[in-house]
Amino acid sequence: MIKDVALVVNPAAGRGGARDVLRRAVDRLAARGIAVRELCGASPAESRDLAGAAVRAGVDALVVVGGDGMIHLALPAVVGTDTPLGVIPAGTGNDQARTYGWPRKSPESAADIVADGYTRRVDVGVAVTADGTRSYFGSVLASGFDSLVSDRTNRMRWPRGRARYNLAMLAEFANLRPLPCTVTTAEGETIRQDVLLVAVGNTPSYGGGMRICPAADPTDGVFDVTIAGAVSRRRAAAQVPRVYRGTHVHRPQARTLRTTALRIEAPGINAYADGEYLGPLPVDVTLEPQAVSLLVPRASAGG
């Protein structure tokens, strides 16, 4: 039974709308008889430390208010523990909310899922980049064109929100080029080719509903990997609607595989996961099966 929770918030999530979401969620949790400890560090690192300390001190659940980036921040605190992670969606993309059925428009309904206490054990990815940085991720690891877009987005100061990402994508389309890449799987297969991108999916989507790894299942113990071969600008642009539908994987320039671990090498490319910067390639990616307990709607609970 959930009686007390530690709640971590990113005030900037959802273009600043997280503050209202926070208040509404806290009010509903209080109405359900749950004590709430609010945690808000001055930096992501401080918030991560506060989350870890709360779990170690003993709390019935760790809850984040935000999007995939906040889930990314919280994962180190709960991986390998019995403390479940709850999510009150308040991000821009909210791709894991799509996967797990967390309400994206009703903080009260999301808080009810926390209070109800139904859980599901899920897999988590682990990435180690060339600089030795080790990170957990819950959704998709991106490397290639998509990470170049993220690089450019992070360098830009205007415009704000989704428009900045879209502008960065247009700029990278103008610079589109083949990316020499080597992928080595746990099974010993080595793939060397020019690519547009390589995406490693624990869950199906990233970027606000782009189903880059449409068959990914976070409970099956393997990654779904999408390798998009290098194509012209026109063909790449034509693939974007197909990515939202998940049908791009049926095109001849796409290759999919399933594996428990892989290494991705591509000069000058960075890795991102859950929308967050990880570090430069090469990156070694492994899976930790059933590593995290999530608070989910009763219909999708596993116990």
Image: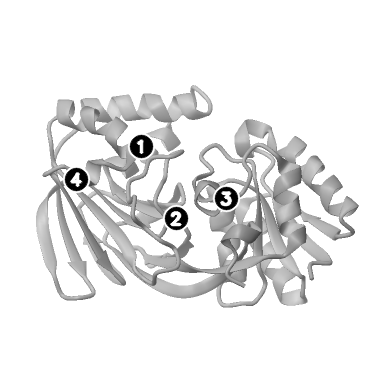
* Disc 1 crowd, CA 10 A, few/some/many (<14, 14-19, 20+): some
Name the residue rendered at 77%, 75% in the picture: 58
Q: Secondary structure at mark 4?
A: helix
Kindly identify which residue carries mark 4: 250
* Disc 4 crowd, CA 10 A, few/some/many (<14, 14-19, 20+): few
Name the kind of residue labelled 1 in the image.
Answer: Tyr
- Picture quadrant of residue 247: top left
Kindly identify which residue carries mark 1: 244
For the residues marked 1 and 3, what is the alpha-carbon distance in whole angstroms? 18 Å
Quarter occupied by the C terminus: bottom right
Res. 196 visible in picture: no
Pick the front one: 268 or 245 = 245
Pick the front one: 9 or 155 = 9
> Which one is earlier in the sequence, the residue at label 1 or at label 4?
1
Name the residue rendered at 15%, 75% in the picture: 188
Kindly identify which residue carries mark 3: 101
For the residues marked 3 and 2, what is the alpha-carbon distance in whole angstroms? 14 Å
Quick check: 71 left or right of 186?
right
Q: Are marks 2 and 1 in contact (CB under 8 Å)?
A: no
Quarter occupied by the N terminus: bottom right
Q: Position of residue 94 (x, y in %)?
A: 54, 43
For the residues marked 4 and 3, what is the alpha-carbon distance in whole angstroms? 26 Å
Kindly identify which residue carries mark 2: 139
Name the kind of residue labelled 2 in the image.
Answer: Ser
> Which one is earlier in the sequence, the residue at label 4 or at label 3?
3
* Disc 3 crowd, CA 10 A, few/some/many (<14, 14-19, 20+): some
> Which one is earlier in the sequence, the residue at label 2 or at label 4?
2
| Of labels 2 and 4, the one closer to you | 4
Quick check: 147 left or right of 264?
right
Pick the front one: 302 or 270 = 302
Q: Position of residue 150 (x, y in %)?
A: 39, 39
In the image, is residue 198 above or below residue 246? below
